[in-house]
Structure formats: structure tokens, C-alpha cells
Amino acid sequence: MKLLQIIGARPQFIKYYPLQMALERYGDGIRDILVHTGQHYDYEMSEVFFDQLGIKKPDYHLEVGSATHGVQTARIIEKVEGVIQKERPDYVVVYGDTNSTLGGALAAAKLHIPVIHIESGLRSYNKKMPEEINRVLTDHISTILFCPTKTACRNLKKEGFKNQILNGNLIPLDFELQSNQITSDNSVIINCGDIMYDAMLLSLKKADELSTILTNLTLKPKTYNLITFHRAENTDDREKLKMLINFVLKHSEHKIIFPVHPRTKKIIKENNIKLPDKIITTEPLNYFDTLLLLKNADKLFTDSGGMQKEAYWLKIPTVTLREETEWVETVQSGWNILYRDYKGTHNPKRQSFHFGDGKAGERIIKIVRQLYERQ
Ligand code: UD1
């Protein structure tokens, strides 16, 4: 069996890592062809994750680089199409909601190669977010939709997907697909748990051992807050950007560590926005440094999807700098509060929502193998 996996942006390198580990254990006979679109290209945004997590060198690097959404997505479609035509894979795997996800999925679906979407079913119901467009479209042209949570499965059901395994509950590790549950023209929804939870569990110990970020920044646990933001809707409007920075300053009794995404950095510079001394900026951080910094923070302010969940798993109170979130469970539990609703305190409840058991990668590989063997 030949899998062609497409990654290109920072969170996708992290999501691919547990899949690579699962392939090593359960992927006997599966050929894994890795394609890096080149959507992210700075060392801190890309290569560092390959080095740190031991991700294999991509078989293809498409070097699409930065551009407008139309141009970037078009370049991805064109170049991925070429790779698919050459390799003729059995399945194409895409992750999350970036332009690399949509471009890869479109190229595959038009060539009649079944698309496997990992992190399927998330919705913000805000079509102004490029990510929302990417994920809705990708889901609707995918054959296997691997969801991280029951909520994600439910969202897909609302959009007309009927073929849902075990009512959207996490499938057991030894789950066997029945042949009537797989048909070539009927997509299937499977809750396999959250692959980012796998990645975090695989990495926490190494982060503790290897990261020196607290010493480098002379930080003591729980004496600082962490802030990250990069979403177009927060950075492209100068007034909103300033408002959010002032919001964080107002609600932070500690100093604030701010690893700055390149797009945010560019906009801060272009608009000559001065940050007060209380905010300590750094370059974008590698995965282990991010986990360690997050684990020891007093509070997180973020517009990142992944970090909202990582903070929840690590029990770090979070304020999300967005109007809505796809990760509604983190808000319902009180650990995460949307900034407009934040009154200065958290009142977190016992964590009753789960995002799987850290074995999403294993489930994905086992299901894909069954699908291949039974078709
Ligand atoms: C993309 C994803 C977003 C994800 C994020 C993770 C889309 C639509 N968005 O957003 O869902 O949360 O990745 O980081 O796909 N840049 C650099 N160096 C790089 C990469 C980007 O300088 O290595 C700068 C460029 O100016 C570029 C801008 O950042 O134009 C935005 O990059 P892009 O990949 O288009 O989107 P992200 O904001 O990173």
C-alpha cells in the first residue's frame, strides 16, 4: 500500500510525528511518501521540527512559499497533482485546515485518489476564517474523516454525513471495520482521538529533559504568562492587533513571554507598534520549548487552535483571543474563556471531556490497513 502524506505548515509537522511513529510499529508493508508543500519555510517554522522530532526527510519538497491564498493554494494543487500522477498512491493523507490541506485534498480528489482527512469535523462557523473554508471543503471531498472528538463527529452529521462509526464515540484499538461500513462512494466518520494529544504525550518527557527555555529566559514556574497570536483576523487589522495587546497587558499581573510568528512580527514592524518592557518577545519556538513554557506558565493568551488544547491537557487557564473557537469542550469546562467573556478569573471544572487516549496514530494506521485489505 502506498500512502502519500501532505504537510506544509508548522502544526502539521507536529501532527505527522505520531503517525510516523505508528507507521514504524504497525505499518509493515505500507510505503509512506512524504510531501512538504513549503508553505512554511523559515528554519524556526519548519526544519527545526524535523530535526527535533526526528521526522524523516520529505520525499518531495514543493517550495510553494508565501503568496495570496489563491496563488498559494493553486501552486499547491498544481504541484501535488504532479506528484500524485507520478506516484499513483492508494490514499492521500491531509492534516488540519491549512491551505496545504485543501490544496492537497483537491488535487487528490480530482484524480480519484481517496482522501484521508486527519482532524476532521471541526467548525468555527465563521466563513471569514480561511481555515474554516479549508476544513469544510476538505471534509466534503474526503473518504475517511478521522475526527478528534465526538463533537467533531456530530458537526459532520449535521452536514449530512451519515456513515458514522459507533455513534461518534472513540473506537476501540482493536476495532474491525465491517465490509458494509466501507464503500468506495460513501465516506466514513471515525473518532480516533486527537493526534496532537499523541504528539504531546510522546514529547513531554523529552521536553523536560532537553529544553532549556526557562533558564534561557530566566523564568521561574508560574511567574509569567504566555501569549501567541498569528491569525489573519487578529493581525491584519492594526487597531485589533493593538486592542488585543492592550487587553493582554491589562489582564496580566506577570511579565508576558511572546514568541512572535513571522506574519505578526512583520505587521508589528510595519505599523511601528511599540511593545512595553513587560512583554518579552522571542523568535518562534520549537515544540519542546513551547510545551515546557506552556506547562510552567501561569496563564495562556492565544489564538492558536493547538495551544488551546495543549493548555487544557496541561491544566493551564487560557484566554482565547478570538470571537469563537472550534474547541468548544475547553470552554465548556471553564479552562478556556473567549476574550470577550473574560472578567479576570477562571473557574475551571473537573475535566470530563476527552480527546482520546494518545493512540490516534495507531487507530489511523490500523483502519487504513483494513480499508485497503477489504477493498
Ligand atoms: C497557517 C495556517 C493556519 C495555521 C498556521 C500555523 C492557512 C490558511 N493558515 O497560517 O491555519 O494556524 O499556518 O502557523 O493555511 N511566513 C514567514 N515564514 C514562514 C511562513 C510564513 O515569514 O516560514 C510569513 C509570510 O509573511 C506569510 C505569512 O507568514 O505571508 C503567513 O504565512 P501563511 O503560511 O500564509 O499562513 P500562517 O499565518 O502561518
Image (cartoon, rainbow, N blue to C red):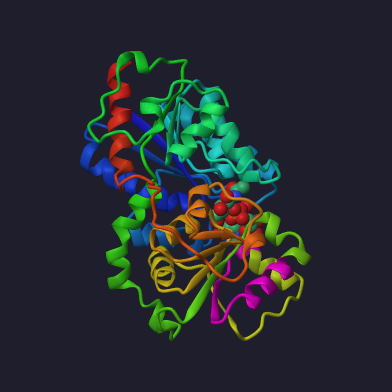
The correct choice, above or below, for 121 with respect to 263 in the image is above
x and y percent of residue 223 in the render?
A: 46, 82
- Residue 275 placed where, x, y %? 67, 80
Looking at this view, is 151 or 104 the one in front?
151
- Image quadrant in which you'd find residue 34: top left
Residue 157 visible in the snapshot? yes
* The magenta stretch spans residue 270: no
Q: Quadrant of the C terminus?
A: top left
Q: Is residue 126 above or below residue 200?
A: above
Identify the residue shown where x is 69% and y is 74%: 246
What residue range appears in magenta?
A: 241-263
Give the image quadrant in which the ligand numbered 1 is located: bottom right
The x and y percentages for residue 165 are 38, 26
Instruction: Give the residue displayed 28% in from the left and 66% down from the top.
Output: 206
- At 62% from the left and 60% from the top, the residue drawn is 230
Which of these two is toward me, 11 or 158?
A: 158
- The part of the image, by quadrant, that contains residue 103 is top right
| Left or right of residue 47, residue 179 in this image | left
Q: Quadrant of the N terminus?
A: top left
Residue 168 to residue 54: above or below: above
User: In this image, 306 relative to 20: left or right?
Assistant: right
Q: Is residue 1 left or right of residue 127?
A: left
Location of residue 50 by image quarter: bottom left
Residue 190: percent from the left, percent from the top? 39, 31
Is residue 246 in the magenta section? yes
Observer able to see residue 90: no
Number of marks in the image? 0
